[in-house]
């Protein structure tokens, strides 16, 4: 075993820092925790010791790096290490060399160094080289955290999925105050009392949790184990047997008698709104799922109450489908609750608010709907005569198992999780249950060949990543969400009197009273970072998301507010602190805003809004470094056109300087071209040899919230739907074709109602000045970016009565079928849409090379007859489905 000590603190980049960058210039590329350049050596494991990766500030930090020599010769590697804090600042570095690893053997190397005095989240990058050649770069992480001095608040709960006694000390250090657990009935053991009793005895998990001071919340699934009943489902037989029906009530009664008051709540919850959309799992539909749930939940309630009349039994457990995507909300929930009658005491939800799976696309922030979902559930509870509170029984975000510990997605998940806990704390709710603290099954599935570590692996483990150490045992590496959870558990323990305060620039503030009667404010922004100016009435304590504390004197203060919440503490009356927040100001960061896009090969169109109350003399600098003096009227939007060579592409900005203040104006300079046909037009073949615009899942899937697995809409491998679109022109027509791969074709309309099912929807725009989205609030025109008479909204569909080309609602002209040339065919899962749009019909009388248009399209897809209209579509541009927005169309230039 090799111990590394005497690490040196970095004050400025030195020779070693330069060597690291020079030798491993690609080390930071990508978002994976490990990069392998040569396979002579393999990193078997790299993990922290301590209490599951947690150390006290100032404590000696210890990590293990196990390296395997995969060659037949002795290896003498060189290892360079860098420790960074959460901000990415290098804190420590060291080099280890002059040691050997025997051929085809593994060596365990223990790193030991003094920990910082500052709490927080730290990453360790290890760069391994051999004979001057880079071999691999791998990464681990650890946390420095002060233990809690007060008992934990049960509000901060570890979810019932994948809890483990192995992490118990870690749960305690982070500040969890309760833990959920499952007791399944599916295998129907005859002597359930003996099995369950063991969990409360020495060596049992529930006894260990209770001894650690954690409150217990029990869960029993009130649905059959559908996955084990596929044969019954296939044969159309009932999934609940007579034996099971008689067993359920006795099972629940037995659990309650043994647990007694040691379990505070029994949850009989299920995501019935998810299961109702999964006939592939349940074999039925919403009615059969609701029937199974109603019977089992009633039976369990009766059993629990017979043994413990005062124990709260919690029902429901829907995810977001029955709230966000149901009109009106809670349709299935009300049916379920009506069926339960008096057989429930409290409501719970799995409080998701959009896409939680980062492997499917951008995750949705909690501000989107979390608080309203909870508040409306509380109102639903009151309508049924139950208490005005609701349990959040599950919430999480998933990441790629192999994501780097300092990756943007792990940082985003940490911030979103902390913001979720703050928002949840602002409503009456006994628990915030963090779904899956650690999925310790993943590394064994990788080892056994059931998962491929080289491909993305969905990991719900929010607090720790599980790995196998050099002996094949579990080891745990904390993720950034762990320090965020710990900070929330300390700053918001047993708070009361919540107050939501919304400020400008997407700044959110929540005010609470702590149990020591001090006031605390959690504040962050959902937009770009801003400066928040406050006047502290008394000295203020400040705690960052990483648990770093500081004290600020009374008087004026300027705080940088970002997406990572900070907490301010004041020993002052509520009304004083509330008044301070009400008077907070956010200095104007920019005097102007706007947007622009390319109009042809050599020009761009810009619209700039002056936010000031006075005219401005400004200077605009374009990406080609050309400068242009501008005069901008007060509180007005001005339009300009400038030359800009075609080689400038991509999403960039123009710089506008006025009164010494710099504003950045977004420019969308990418464009698409339509070649002129050089051969006679022939249906089905005219586009051969042209380069298509390709759409696929998940990149071009909209709306992004519908990517959540609960909706069960598409597979991510492209086997459900994809599209290729071609555009060309001649003197008479603009030619458009879409080749759509779609194994399931549904189209029940035959006119302008074709939008309700599978169809190809494209828009041709001939105006170049729709209002950019950033300026919508400044214009006096009603719906300034809506489709006008210069946006031609067209749709094509293959109906039961033949092919249809129609002008769709939402543009200037009247909707209806069109007799323009078109053709739609379908063969071997491919629908081919072709249309020739007469130039004169879209008011283009002199088509020519270099003419700029605006263009967009979507492919609507509906694979479920029970859905009245498509829930999702593939999109080249947004702004076509739902609210029309011409500024979202993209430049199309004739070649």
Image (cartoon, grey):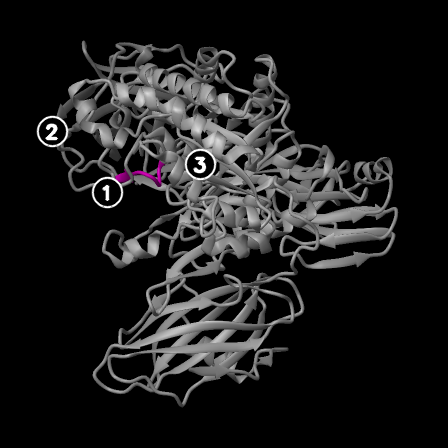
The relative height of residue 13 versus residue 681 in the rendered view (above or below) is below
Please tell me which residue is depicted at 42% across the width and 80% down the height of the picture: 79
Using the image as rendered, state which of residue 352 and residue 13 is in the foreground. 352
Q: Dot 2 corresponds to which residue?
A: 828
Q: Of label 1 and label 3, which has the lower sequence position?
A: 3
Residue 531 position within the rendered picture, expressed as x and y whole percent measured from the top left: 72, 49
Give yes or no for residue 693 being in the magenta stretch: yes
Measured in 3D between alpha carbons, the distance from the residue under mark 3 to the one under mark 2, in whole angstroms, is 33 Å
Q: Which dot, 3 or 2, sits closer to the camera?
A: 3
Using the image as rendered, state which of residue 533 and residue 879 is in the foreground. 533
Q: Dot 1 corresponds to which residue?
A: 691
Q: Residues within 10 Å of mark 2 (few under 14, many from 20)?
A: few
Q: Which dot, 2 or 1, sits closer to the camera?
A: 2
Using the image as rendered, state which of residue 209 and residue 489 is in the foreground. 209
Quadrant for residue 762, please give it. Answer: top left
Measured in 3D between alpha carbons, the distance from the residue under mark 2 to the one under mark 1, in whole angstroms, is 22 Å
Q: Quadrant of the N terminus?
A: bottom left
Q: Residue furthest bottom?
A: 98
The relative height of residue 463 versus residue 890 in the rendered view (above or below) is below
Quadrant for residue 753, please give it. Answer: top left
Residue 355 is tagged as 3
């Amino acid at each position: 075993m090799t111990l590394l000590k005497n690490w040196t603190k970095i004050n400025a980049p030195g020779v070693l820092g330069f060597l690291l960058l020079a030798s491993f210039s690609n080390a930071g590329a990508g978002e994976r925790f490990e990069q392998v350049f040569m396979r002579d050596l393999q990193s078997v494991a790299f993990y922290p010791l301590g209490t599951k990766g947690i150390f006290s500030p100032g404590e000696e930090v210890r990590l293990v790096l196990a390296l395997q020599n995969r060659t037949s010769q002795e290896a003498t590697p060189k290892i360079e290490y860098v420790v960074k804090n959460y901000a990415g600042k290098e804190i420590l570095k060291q080099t280890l060399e002059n040691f050997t690893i025997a051929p085809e053997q593994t060596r365990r190397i223990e790193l030991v160094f003094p920990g910082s005095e500052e709490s927080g989240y730290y990453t360790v990058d290890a760069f391994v080289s051999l004979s001057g050649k880079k071999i691999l770069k791998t990464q681990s992480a650890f946390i420095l955290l002060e233990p809690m001095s007060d008992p934990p608040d049960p509000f901060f709960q570890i979810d019932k999925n994948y809890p483990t006694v192995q992490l118990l000390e870690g749960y305690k250090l982070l500040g969890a105050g309760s833990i959920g657990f499952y007791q399944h009935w599916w295998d129907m053991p005859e002597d359930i009392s003996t099995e369950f009793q063991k969990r409360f005895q020495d060596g049992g998990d529930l006894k260990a949790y209770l001894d650690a001071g954690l409150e217990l919340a029990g869960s029993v699934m009130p649905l059959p184990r559908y996955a084990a009943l596929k044969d019954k489902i296939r044969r159309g037989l009932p999934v609940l047997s007579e034996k099971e029906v008689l067993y359920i009530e006795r099972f629940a009664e037995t659990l309650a008698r043994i647990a007694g008051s040691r379990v505070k709540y029994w949850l009989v919850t299920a995501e019935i709104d998810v299961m109702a959309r999964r006939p592939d799992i349940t074999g039925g539909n919403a009615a059969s799922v609701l029937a199974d749930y109603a019977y089992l939940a009633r039976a369990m309630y009766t059993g629990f109450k017979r043994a413990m009349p005062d124990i709260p039994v919690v029902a429901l457990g829907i995810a977001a489908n029955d709230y966000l995507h149901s009109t009106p909300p809670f349709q299935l929930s009300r049916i379920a609750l009506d069926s339960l009658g008096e057989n429930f005491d409290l409501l719970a939800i799995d409080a998701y608010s959009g896409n939680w799976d980062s492997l499917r696309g951008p995750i949705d922030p909690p501000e989107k709907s979390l608080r309203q979902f909870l508040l409306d559930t509380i109102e639903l509870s009151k309508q049924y005569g139950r208490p005005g509170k609701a349990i959040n029984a599950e919430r999480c975000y998933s990441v790629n198992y192999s994501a780097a510990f300092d990756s943007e997605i792990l940082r985003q998940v940490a911030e979103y999780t902390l913001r979720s806990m703050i928002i949840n704390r602002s409503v009456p709710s006994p628990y915030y249950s963090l779904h899956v603290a650690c999925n310790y099954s993943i590394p064994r599935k990788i080892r056994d060949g059931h998962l491929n570590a080289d491909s993305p692996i969905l990991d719900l483990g929010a607090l720790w990543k599980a790995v196998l150490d050099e002996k094949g045992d579990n080891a745990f590496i904390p993720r950034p969400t762990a320090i965020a959870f710990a900070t929330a558990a300390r700053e918001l323990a047993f708070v009361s009197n919540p107050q939501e305060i919304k400020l400008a620039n997407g700044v959110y503030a929540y005010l609470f009273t702590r149990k020591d009667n001090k006031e605390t404010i959690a504040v962050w922004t959902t937009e770009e970072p801003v400066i928040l100016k406050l006047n502290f009435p008394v000295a203020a304590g400040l705690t960052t998301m990483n648990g770093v504390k500081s004290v600020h004197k009374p008087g004026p203060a300027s705080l940088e507010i970002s997406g990572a919440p900070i907490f301010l503490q004041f020993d002052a009356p509520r009304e004083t602190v509330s008044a301070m927040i009400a008077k907070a100001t956010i200095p104007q960061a920019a005097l102007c805003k706007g947007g622009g896009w390319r109009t042809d090969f050599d020009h761009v169109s810009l619209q700039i809004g002056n936010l000031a109350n006075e005219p401005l003399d400004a200077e605009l600098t374009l990406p080609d470094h050309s400068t242009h003096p501008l005069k901008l009227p007060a509180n007005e939007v001005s339009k300009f056109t400038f030359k800009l060579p075609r080689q400038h592409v991509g999403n960039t900005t123009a710089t506008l300087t006025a009164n010494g203040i710099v504003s950045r104006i977004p420019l969308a300079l990418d464009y698409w071209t339509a070649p002129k046909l050089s051969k006679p037009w022939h249906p089905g073949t005219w586009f051969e040899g042209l380069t298509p615009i390709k759409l696929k899942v998940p990149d071009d899937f909209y709306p992004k919230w519908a990517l959540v697995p609960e909706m069960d809409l598409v597979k991510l491998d492209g086997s459900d739907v994809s599209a290729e679109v071609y555009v060309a022109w001649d003197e008479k027509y603009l030619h458009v074709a879409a080749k759509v791969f779609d194994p399931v074709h549904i189209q029940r309309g035959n006119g302008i109602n074709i939008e309700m099912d599978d169809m190809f929807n494209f828009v041709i725009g001939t105006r170049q000045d729709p209002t950019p989205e950033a300026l919508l609030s400044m214009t006096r025109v009603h719906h300034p970016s809506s489709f006008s008479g210069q946006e031609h909204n067209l749709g094509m569909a293959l109906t039961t009565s033949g092919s249809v080309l129609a002008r769709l609602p939402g543009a200037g002209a009247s909707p209806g079928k069109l007799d323009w040339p078109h053709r739609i065919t379908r063969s071997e899962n491919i629908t081919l849409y072709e249309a020739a749009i007469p130039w004169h019909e879209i008011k283009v009388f002199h088509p020519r090379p270099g003419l700029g248009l605006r263009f967009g399209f979507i492919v609507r897809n509906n694979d479920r007859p029970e859905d009245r209209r498509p829930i999702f579509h593939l999109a080249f541009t947004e702004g076509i489905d739902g609210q029309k927005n011409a500024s979202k169309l993209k430049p199309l230039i004739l070649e």
